[in-house]
């Protein structure tokens, strides 16, 4: 059973380097890094894009729809209900303070005025709208970044098809493949390392039978793993 780990490592290294040489340096690096780059772009620019959306005409329509939906929900809820409805209790994850919301709910329930209802609706609708805008901005930025990176990879790959650059692209692709293969093998070993102590609890008998000391490649990468620093 333990020998299969060495076989998997050989497969990971062979497949990774093979595809890296075939695709070349540019496509290999951009493909490997596109996920992280797209995430970084999304996190960096989500706030300004969200704020721009909130000031746009489209946000007015969304705000109106959210206000109407929450107003309808609050109006249809019994005024005798002391506890917050289940829907409202689930809004803590978008930054709504449950205690303050409960206070506004009690004020509206006891006073039953249009002003108090509007305060309650406004207190709920603004964070909901902000959450929707944040999610939308993040998704658009991420998908847009992925598309731009894929287009850039395609154009640069075509550029490196020129005879003078093709060989260099393949050789650098080999180097990138070696680095990427090492990272993938280290990550694979780190995951197995995490699974081994809890294999019996999880019912993973095939994992619990693994003996790292009976392997060669796995033992080497297992004992000299870059990711052990993070998983220790």
Image: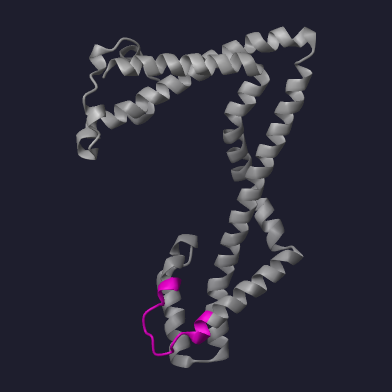
Judge from the rendering whether residue 36 lies leftward or rightward of residue 223; answer left or right: right
Residue 224: percent from the left, percent from the top? Answer: 35, 15
The magenta segment is 73-88
Residue 9: percent from the left, percent from the top? Answer: 40, 17
The picture quadrant where one finds residue 223 is top left
Residue at coordinates 35% horizontally, 14% vertically from top-left? 6
Say whether residue 168 is visible.
Answer: yes
Say whether residue 228 is visible.
Answer: no
- Relative to 122, say whether 210 is above or below: above
- Relative to 129, say whether 205 is above or below: above
The picture quadrant where one finds residue 131 is bottom right
Residue 157: percent from the left, percent from the top? Answer: 73, 21
Residue at coordinates 57% horizontally, 34% vertically from top-left? 36
Q: Give 12 or 212, whichever is nearer the viewer.
A: 12
- Relative to 31, say whether 49 is above or below: below
Of the 4 image quadrants, the one containing the C terminus is top left
Q: Would residue 74 be counted in the magenta stretch?
A: yes
Residue 111: percent from the left, percent from the top? Answer: 47, 92
Residue at coordinates 77% horizontally, 21% vertically from top-left? 158
Residue at coordinates 24% horizontally, 39% vertically from top-left? 202
């Amino acid at each position: 059973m333990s020998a299969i780990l060495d076989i998997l490592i050989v497969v990971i290294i062979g497949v990774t380097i093979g595809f890296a040489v075939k695709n070349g340096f540019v496509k290999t690096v951009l493909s490997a890094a596109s996920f992280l780059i797209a995430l970084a772009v999304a996190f960096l620019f989500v706030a300004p894009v969200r704020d721009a959306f909130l000031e746009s005409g489209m946000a007015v329509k969304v705000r109106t729809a959210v206000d109407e939906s929450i107003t309808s929900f609050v109006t249809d809820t019994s005024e005798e209900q002391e506890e917050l409805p289940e829907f409202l209790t689930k809004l803590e994850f978008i930054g709504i303070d449950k205690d303050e919301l409960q206070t506004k709910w009690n004020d509206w329930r006891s006073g039953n005025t249009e002003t108090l209802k509007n305060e309650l609706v406004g207190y709920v609708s603004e964070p909901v709208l902000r959450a929707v805008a944040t999610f939308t901005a993040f998704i658009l930025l991420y998908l847009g970044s992925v598309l731009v990176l894929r287009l850039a990879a395609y154009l640069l790959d075509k550029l490196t098809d020129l005879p003078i650059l093709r060989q260099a692209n393949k050789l650098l692709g080999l180097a990138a493949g070696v680095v990427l293969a090492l990272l993938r093998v280290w990550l694979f070993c780190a995951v197995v390392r995490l699974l081994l102590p809890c294999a019996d609890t999880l019912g993973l008998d095939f994992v619990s039978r693994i003996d790292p000391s009976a392997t060669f490649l796995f033992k080497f990468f297992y004992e000299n793993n870059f990711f052990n620093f993070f998983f220790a």
